[in-house]
Amino acid sequence: MVMGAAGSKLEKALGDQFPEGERYFGLENFGNTCYCNSVLQALYFCIPFREQLLDYYSNTKNLGDVEENLLTCLADLFSQISSQKKKTGVIAPKRFVQRVKKQNEYFRSYMHQDAHEFLNFLLNELADILQKESDAAKDSIETSSPSEKLANGPNHSLPNGVPKEPLLTWVHKNFQGILTNETRCLRCETVTARDETFLDLSLDIEQNSSITSCLKNFSSTETLNAEDKFFCDKCCSLQEAQKRMKIKKPPHILVIHLKRFKYVEQLGRYKKLSYRVVFPMELKLNNTVEDIDSEYSLFAVVVHVGSGPNHGHYVSLVKSHNHWLLFDDENVEMIDESMVQTFFGSSQEYSGNTDNGYILFYESLGGKS
């Protein structure tokens, strides 16, 4: 069987360097599900996320009959991979893919889907499920008998109408950062700051640029004037203002989405930008509010292969125990770290190289946050 051969080839390549207890499994494609497979591999090798998901799995397994949802299906899949007797092989994520399609009609067709939209949907959905489970657990404590209530300590429920602080689930603890949107009125100099959370950063890209320059542009100051004037509460009128976006709290896992699909008015459709955008192995975030340099290390890249937005293929590059691997649906192979730069993009407009980094996963080197 070809799969076995590929697996044993990988085992041979790693030899006695094969990491203890690690598993490298390809994922079967169910007709254009590479968008899903590539994201799942990146998440599986996001170690803090994997560990927390496997913990969740072992805790819910003891609860007996838990209703199936996207979180239980993903936990089940990760557990299946990590507990394989063999070190390499192929797994069919059938239940998980069925669940995704059941949950979201957007992913039901056999059309080419967008890996970034899938990642976004998945992380938000997982966080929602965890939030609901936590609320349900709190409710069951609050509706228990008075003696049980005392045993559980005082009840800190808030008076009606006061919004509850949303729970920070382990999905949020890994991926969520905070942006602050600062607007400075040019007449009275008052700064208005508004915070918003993010699970990934979508960056506009330019030809022959780098992640650092894309992040600089993301945080650059823009002037609001003419039709775009800002209503200043202090001046009680529309005023010219300067606006900028800064990272207030960098996440533990920084996910960067490069906007490679651009709507072109003249063509009336989206076009893929295969621009060369250099993404480093080590990244310093220096446009944060506190001006503390946050250092990150690259551990996964979802790559879009193909010349247009509506067709093509996704693969992922993953760093595991200091080795780089290429996951292409069922196939897994070892690659040299120097290969990663072949996925930066092309400095020529019409080159044949259409294998471009699309979603980048960086882990903070500053210990677990």
Image: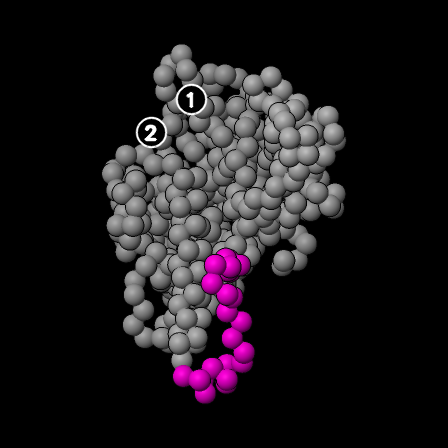
Q: From which residue to which does the magenta span run?
A: 145-167
Q: Nearer the observer, disc 1 or disc 2?
A: 1
Name the dominant secondary structure of the magenta segment. Answer: loop
The CA span between labels 1 and 2 is 16 Å
The reply to whether dot 1 and dot 2 touch (C-beta < 8 Å) is no
Q: Secondary structure at mark 1?
A: strand
Does residue 162 belong to the magenta stretch?
A: yes
Q: Amino acid at mark 2?
A: His
Q: Amino acid at mark 1?
A: Tyr
Residue 147 in percent (x, y) is at 45, 87
- Pick whichever of labels 1 and 2 is earlier in the sequence: 1
Residue 174 image-quadrant placement: bottom right
Residue drawn at x 41%, y 71% as measured from the top left = 139
- Is residue 238 visible in the rendered image? The answer is yes
Q: Which residue in the structure is indicated by mark 2? A: 311
Badge 1: how crowded within 10 Å, few (<14), some, or many (20+)?
Answer: few
Badge 2: how crowded within 10 Å, few (<14), some, or many (20+)?
Answer: some
Q: Which residue in the structure is indicated by mark 1? A: 263
| Image position of 214 (left or right of 138) | right
Q: Secondary structure at mark 2?
A: loop
Q: Is 361 in front, or is 281?
A: 361
Depicted 134 relative to depicted 203: above or below: below
Q: Residue furthest top?
A: 266
Does residue 156 belong to the magenta stretch?
A: yes
Residue 53 in percent (x, y) is at 45, 62
Residue 142 in percent (x, y) is at 43, 75
Residue drawn at x 61%, y 41% as measured from the top left = 194
Residue drawn at x 28%, y 53% as measured from the top left = 99
| Image position of 302 (left or right of 218) | left
Q: Is 71 in front, or is 182?
A: 182
